[in-house]
């Protein structure tokens, strides 16, 4: 035992086990240097103006790095992502996206990047009315379906029932009758909207005219083994059936003609002239909802004028969205849908039916799992609608979008936006700075617009996150919307 005690006594002690009491910090630490214990700090509350004056360097927390990658934060350099459907219930209450900016600032490029990313996450890209034909290349690359509406091209029957009508034989009789009534109601409502366009009556049908159209649609649907067309409805009205006469409470042929003459002439106009062959025959290529992406290209109608484009938008929107809605009702819609609504101002001015349709979409897309991307240039586009009811509904479109993305805009436009979605003075100054061109091009050099590809992402009441979109080489070729302008300049210079 003594030998063991001597051995322990002579064993050297490790240096790191030696404790010097003079190096132990007191409870509240030394007057200088590190402290072993840090007391909890005191919390002070103040306005953003006061706190910014005390410490002007804080930044808002970044967005979650989940969803579709967009690019680098212009202030911190960190990755910025967009995930409208994934943020519902945490950061937002609605998956709709409002995208606004001056022409040529990259709005379509961001919409296509977001759509492409959501397709990768299992969504179906559906562009129900591609006025400029910008989505055809992307949809083709994704292995989707491109329907080109125009003379000598594809035709869309706006009264087509889509997959719902083709599945009626598989349903019980009571359910089938209920769905037929729903289909006929939608068909009649679409005809009312088309009649309100300049190629129709130029106004909403009267009560008497609406009653005649509703009855004619129902009779044409019952007489047709397939979906009725607008010429079928005209034929029914011309034959003066007893059911319509009873509905209108008329017995003399002259009375009947006075009641329906205007409607018949307006429906004939929808099948003649610039619209001939577009929407007056059966659908030539039904939408294949099993495809990952679909677009209805209306670019071939641009040369026919705005009124023809408006009628085309009404017809294709009604057809495509009814196809999706009814396929979902039958459980045949395999994936949720992302709807890029480019050239929103054209769609809203197409007719009263479009404003009501978009209003319904933004109210119900959370429950349906749909992502709507509404793209426009100015809030003044909403104020140009003909009735106060339509203008009020259009203003509600932006209010229900919790995700707002702003590209380069003027100060005046930003103040209009701030009335609905409050912006700070710094955010207005930043976005407005992107709108000022930095070069005239007179020196022969080519310089991009300073706001090209820059966006401010506002989520609810959070501080905006400025980001620059970074496109891959493939995306640059697919998203190029300036090709036509470059071709004109090169032709002029040569």
Image (cartoon, rainbow, N blue to C red):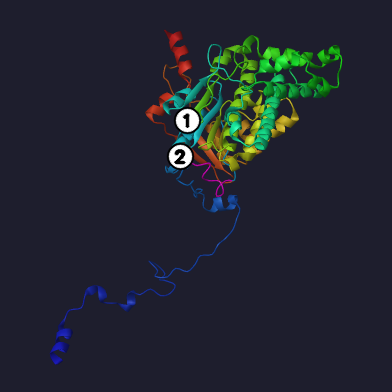
Residue 393 x, y percent position in the rendering = 69, 34
Q: Which residues are magenta?
A: 82-92
| Label 1 crowd bin: few (<14), some (14–19), many (20+), radius 10 Å | some
Given residues 353 and 391, the one toward you in this image is: 353
Query: What's the residue at 81%, 13% (across, down)?
Result: 257
Mark 2 lies on a secondary structure that is loop
Q: Which residue is mark 1?
A: 291
Left or right, 127 with respect to 307, comes to left
- Specify whether residue 105 is in view: no
Please tell me which of labels 1 and 2 falls first in the chain.
2
Mark 1 lies on a secondary structure that is loop
Taking the magenta stretch, the answer to whether it contains residue 241 is no
- Specify whether residue 34 is in view: yes
Given residues 379 and 259, the one toward you in this image is: 259
Disc 1, disc 2: CB below 8 Å? no
Characterize the magenta stretch by its predominant secondary structure: loop
Left or right, 57 with respect to 395, comes to left
Residue 252 x, y percent position in the rendering = 86, 14
Give the quadrant of the C terminus: top left
Measured along the vertical axis of the image, is residue 265 above or below residue 103? above
Q: Which residue is mark 2?
A: 121
């Amino acid at each position: 035992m003594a030998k063991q005690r001597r051995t322990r006594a002579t064993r050297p002690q490790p240096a790191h086990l030696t404790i010097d009491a003079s190096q132990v910090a007191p409870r509240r630490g030394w007057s200088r240097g590190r402290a072993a214990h840090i007391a909890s700090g005191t919390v002070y509350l103040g306005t953003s103006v006061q706190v910014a004056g005390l410490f002007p360097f804080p930044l808002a927390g970044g967005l979650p790095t989940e969803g579709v990658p967009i690019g680098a934060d212009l202030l911190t350099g960190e990755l910025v992502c967009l995930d409208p459907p994934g943020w519902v219930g945490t950061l937002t209450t609605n998956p709709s996206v409002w995208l606004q900016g001056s022409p040529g600032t990259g709005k379509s490029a961001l919409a296509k990047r977001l759509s492409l990313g959501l397709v990768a996450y299992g969504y179906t890209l559906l562009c129900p009315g591609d006025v400029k034909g910008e989505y055809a290349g992307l949809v083709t690359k994704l292995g989707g379906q491109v329907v080109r509406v125009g003379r000598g091209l594809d035709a869309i029957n706006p009264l087509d029932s889509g997959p719902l009508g083709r599945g009626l034989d598989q349903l019980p009789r009571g359910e089938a009758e209920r769905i037929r009534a729903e289909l006929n109601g939608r068909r009649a409502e679409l005809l009312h909207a088309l009649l309100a366009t300049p190629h129709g009556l130029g106004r909403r049908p009267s009560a008497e005219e609406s009653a005649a159209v509703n009855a004619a649609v129902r009779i044409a649907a019952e007489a047709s083994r397939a979906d009725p067309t607008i010429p079928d409805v005209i034929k029914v009205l011309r034959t003066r059936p007893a059911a319509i006469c009873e509905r209108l409470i008329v017995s003399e042929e002259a009375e009947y003609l006075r009641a329906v003459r205007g409607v018949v002439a307006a429906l004939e106009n929808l099948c003649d002239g610039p619209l001939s062959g577009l929407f007056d025959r059966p659908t030539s290529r039904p939408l294949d909802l099993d495809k990952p992406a679909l677009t209805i290209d209306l670019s071939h109608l641009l040369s026919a004028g705005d009124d023809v484009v408006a009628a085309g938008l009404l017809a294709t929107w009604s057809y495509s969205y009814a196809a999706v809605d009814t396929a979902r009702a039958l459980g045949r819609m395999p994936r949720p849908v992302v709807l890029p609504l480019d050239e929103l101002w054209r769609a809203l001015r197409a007719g009263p039916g479009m404003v009501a349709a978009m209003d319904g979409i933004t109210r119900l897309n959370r429950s349906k799992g749909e992502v709507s991307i509404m793209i426009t240039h100015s809030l003044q586009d909403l104020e140009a609608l003909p009735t106060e009811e339509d203008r009020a509904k259009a203003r509600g479109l932006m209010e229900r979008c919790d995700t707002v993305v702003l590209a380069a805009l003027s100060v005046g436009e930003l103040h209009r936006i701030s009335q609905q979605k409050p912006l700070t003075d710094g955010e207005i100054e930043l976005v407005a700075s992107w709108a000022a061109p930095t070069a005239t091009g007179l020196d022969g050099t080519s310089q991009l617009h300073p706001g090209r590809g820059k966006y401010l992402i506002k989520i609810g009441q959070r501080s905006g996150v400025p980001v620059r979109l970074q496109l891959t080489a493939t995306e640059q070729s697919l998203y190029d919307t300036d090709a036509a302008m470059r071709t004109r300049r090169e032709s002029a210079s040569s």
